[in-house]
């Protein structure tokens, strides 16, 4: 019987309780920190490759393990973590299904042949946003993007589609950190207000 390996940062308790009890599954936790997620993936692969006597749980106990073929890994949430996990799982031909990784990079099938997702990639979101801006009749907008692949690739996709639709983006794209503070938010708001009134 195949084992469904469920790897998730935030696992819904109700979902866990409702899993079909006749199927075998194993729950692991991935962090949003990509290096820790990669470490957990290596431990996971090590356990599916062998029942090595040198493997211990974090509390020092020996794991209770029965060998089952792996049907799939579910997760991770973030695209950055999924890229690292998918790169490792692909080497062992283990399918991965993500429920929220939207990074366009993960659409590259030669690189991520065993990766699948249940949400559309970021470039489709950026295309939709550009069409909404155009439908509202806006011809000039400011842009704010999160630093990193998610925001920077997203704004690049938005910029390309917006240009085709005749929407101009202010030359400066304000880049913010994922964990920005209210002070940073107020600063960006002031900068945007200043630029609007200077034109």
Image (cartoon, rainbow, N blue to C red):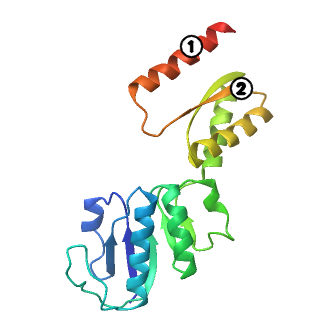
Q: Residue 41, percent across and down? A: 43, 72
Q: Is residue 154 above or below residue 189?
A: below
Q: Return the residue at label 1.
A: 193
Position of 150 compared to 69: left or right? right
Is 149 on the left or on the right of 108, as rendered?
left
Q: Rounded to the nearest whole Å, what is the CA distance between mark 2 and mark 1?
A: 15 Å
Residue at x 33% of width, y 82% of height: 23
Instruction: Locate residue 44: give its quadrant.
Output: bottom left
Residue 122, numbered label: none
Residue 171 is marked as 2
Q: Is residue 185 above or below residue 43?
A: above
- Asked whether residue 117 appears in the rendered view, the answer is no
The residue sitting at 52% across, 56% down in the picture is 80
Which residue is located at x 52 percent, y 22 percent? Answer: 188
Q: Decide if residue 141 is on the left or right side of residue 32.
A: right
Question: What x and y, as percent, mark residue 4?
Answer: 39, 78
């Amino acid at each position: 019987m195949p084992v469904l390996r469920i790897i998730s940062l935030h696992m819904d308790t109700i979902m866990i309780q409702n899993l079909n009890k006749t199927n075998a599954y194993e729950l692991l936790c991935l962090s949003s920190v990509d290096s820790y997620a990669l470490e957990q993936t290596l431990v996971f692969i090590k356990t599916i490759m062998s029942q090595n006597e040198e493997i211990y749980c974090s509390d020092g106990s020996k794991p209770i393990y029965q060998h089952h073929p792996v049907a799939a890994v579910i997760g991770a949430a973030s695209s950055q973590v999924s890229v690292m996990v998918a790169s490792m799982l692909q080497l062992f031909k283990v399918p991965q299904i993500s429920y929220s990784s939207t990074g366009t990079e993960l659409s590259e099938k030669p690189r991520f042949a065993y990766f699948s997702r249940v949400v559309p990639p970021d470039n489709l979101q950026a295309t939709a946003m550009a069409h909404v801006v155009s439908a509202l009749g806006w011809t000039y907008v400011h842009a704010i993007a999160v630093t990193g692949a998610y925001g920077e690739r997203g704004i690049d996709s938005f910029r390309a589609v917006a240009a085709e639709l005749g929407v101009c983006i202010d030359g400066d794209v304000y880049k913010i950190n994922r964990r920005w503070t209210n002070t940073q938010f107020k600063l960006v708001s002031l900068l945007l207000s200043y630029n609007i009134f200077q034109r």
